[in-house]
Amino acid sequence: MKRRRMNKLYIGNLSPAATAEDLRQLFGERKLPLAGQVLLKSGYAFVDYPDQNWAIRAIETLSGKVELHGKVMEVDYSVPKKLRSRKIQIRNIPPHLQWEVLDGLLAQYGTVENVEQVNTDTETAVVNVTYASKEEAKVAIEKLSGHQFENYSFKISYIPDEEVSSPPPPQRSRRGGHSSREQGSSPGGSSQPKQLDFPLRMLVPTQFVGAIIGKEGLTIKNLTKQTQSKVDIHRKENAGAAEKPITIHATPEGCSEACRMILDIMQKEADETKSTEEIPLKILAHNSLVGRLIGKEGRNLKKIEQDTGTKITISPLQDLTIYNPERTITVKGSTEACSNAEVEIMKKLREAYENDVVAINQQANLIPGLNLSALGIFSTGLSMLPSTPGARGAAAAAPYHPFASSSAYLSGLYGAPPAGAFPHQHPLPEQEVVNLFIPTQAVGAIIGKKGQHIKQLARFAGASIKITPAEGPDASERMVIITGPPEAQFKAQGRIFGKLKEENFFNPKEEVKLEAHIKVPSFAAGRVIGKGGKTVNELQNLTSAEVIVPRDQTPDENEEVIVKIIGHFFASQTAQRKIREIVQQVKQQEQKHAQGAPASQPSK
């Protein structure tokens, strides 16, 4: 019933002379045939469409553009007043609009709980947005209706919010379009993390799709049986495209074996058709993961090339759009060499993905009540973590925002966190001070016109934010002093990272990495470093951030020393939280010792 309600359309501003047959004929002429009943009233009518794509096409084709008996029709979703709540649909979005820009725009009007991209055959993009409250959705409709972006004017409608009149879904069903297969892969409530479903995504030349499927589907059936995998070939997407995406769900070994078999099939077909062109392996990877595949100064990629005897290139960041958050990793070499490279590439990507999921889990647990969806834009593309695998850039209603319903998303993937895994030491969070260093030329963008942006940021985050004067005329960086509890730090730093990305203060090929300084008591610095640097090395491996505790520091008047953290947003945040956790443990041990209780020996 939900789907039928979603796709019921209201046709308004009709002439009294209009008949149901007139409407059928008009819709039919525009290749929008009405299969169901036309409910005609005085001056308006209702029609049903079988799916959302047809409904969007009808609205876009007819509303405000077509006359019937001298009156221009209005066409929109029919949404009863009781269901006009938090959910809206935004249409006519430029297809090249970056997710980060849209994220920032939506966040201006309230807390965004979920954003789903709708799979349509229109040239422009369509998203369904759920705000945290009815009032925020109303403001967004008022402010964004007709919003001009370049030569595109946003079109906005309410869509039914079923949760207003329905009881909440059972705990195990997660919002956001994940398939039942994924839900079943990791039962909620298990305290042991299971293997995350991280599919292999490939691009294959369209001319080889038939050979991969085989006569009556026998080849693909054999492949899935042998590798115990689920293989989706997205044949209907990107009509006329030279390449088609394939998604393979299996264990890491199953994915690699399926990939090897597909490469063999394509090579055999090329040999039989006397195609002399080399067939490269093309892997699709989410932009948020690619930086860690490449590694510092390209070391990871170079090592894979050397170890496997392949040549690897990655598509540029400029190719990313609202429809395409993935980059193409092209591997050239023999079938055997490409297969070996796939194993190593996927190992790095899978590791990065699992680290990100753990990072989100830790942020959500370390900062009680943190509403991750409110943070808007992130530098690393984490606002576009892989979700429901579908056709490239056109996953039907696939959320690009991992922070929507983050607890449900993560508990479904990872099981409930073990009790006490993330202890909260204080019912009231402590005020923390972080010094964040930004490029000097970015100061104006952070401050905004007449200081408006920095004031809004401080209010949004619940933090004090001050930018210190330049140390000299040639200073390349300025220090931003952020004071506030953990949630405020997370929000303020997240928005600053995002603003720098949005305003292009970093090269398009660069991830936004900033240096942050936090102070720790001098007596705890040794624990942060660990014996022989063990702890600091483990921190760096866990978080992907560079952590430096300068030696021979003179403690300040508060007997504190500086710890430097350099990395992208989530890496920096996780490192900050981990370091503060270590400091808290040391303080507790010091207190126990002072009170005469036997203190446990700190492990180094």
Image (cartoon, rainbow, N blue to C red):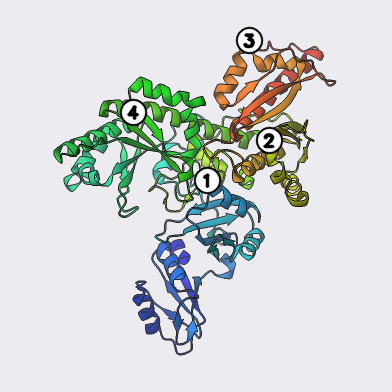
Depth check: give the residue in front, 176 or 454.
454
Q: Residue furthest right?
A: 557
Q: Name the residue under label 3.
A: 531
Lateral position of residue 508 relative to residue 463, left or right: left
Q: If you read the primary sequence from the N terminus, does the residue marked by circle 4 or circle 3 appear first?
A: 4
Disc 2 secondary structure class? strand
Residue 148 in percent (x, y) is at 58, 62
Q: Name the residue under label 4.
A: 253
The amino acid beneath tag 4 is Glu
Q: Name the residue under label 2.
A: 438
Q: How far apart are marks 2 and 3 (CA)?
A: 32 Å
Residue 560 in percent (x, y) is at 78, 20
The amino acid beneath tag 3 is Lys
Q: Name the residue under label 1.
A: 171
Q: Distance between the residues labelled 2 and 1?
A: 42 Å
The amino acid beneath tag 2 is Ile
The amino acid beneath tag 1 is Gln
Which of the two discs, 4 and 2, sits closer to the camera?
A: 2
Q: If you read the primary sequence from the N terminus, does the residue marked by circle 3 or circle 1 appear first?
A: 1
Q: Distance between the residues labelled 4 and 3?
A: 37 Å
Which of the two discs, 4 and 1, sits closer to the camera?
A: 4
The residue carrying pointer 3 sits among few (fewer than 14), some (14 to 19) or many (20 or more) residues within 10 Å by Cα, namely few
Query: For the C terminus, which image quadrant?
Result: top right
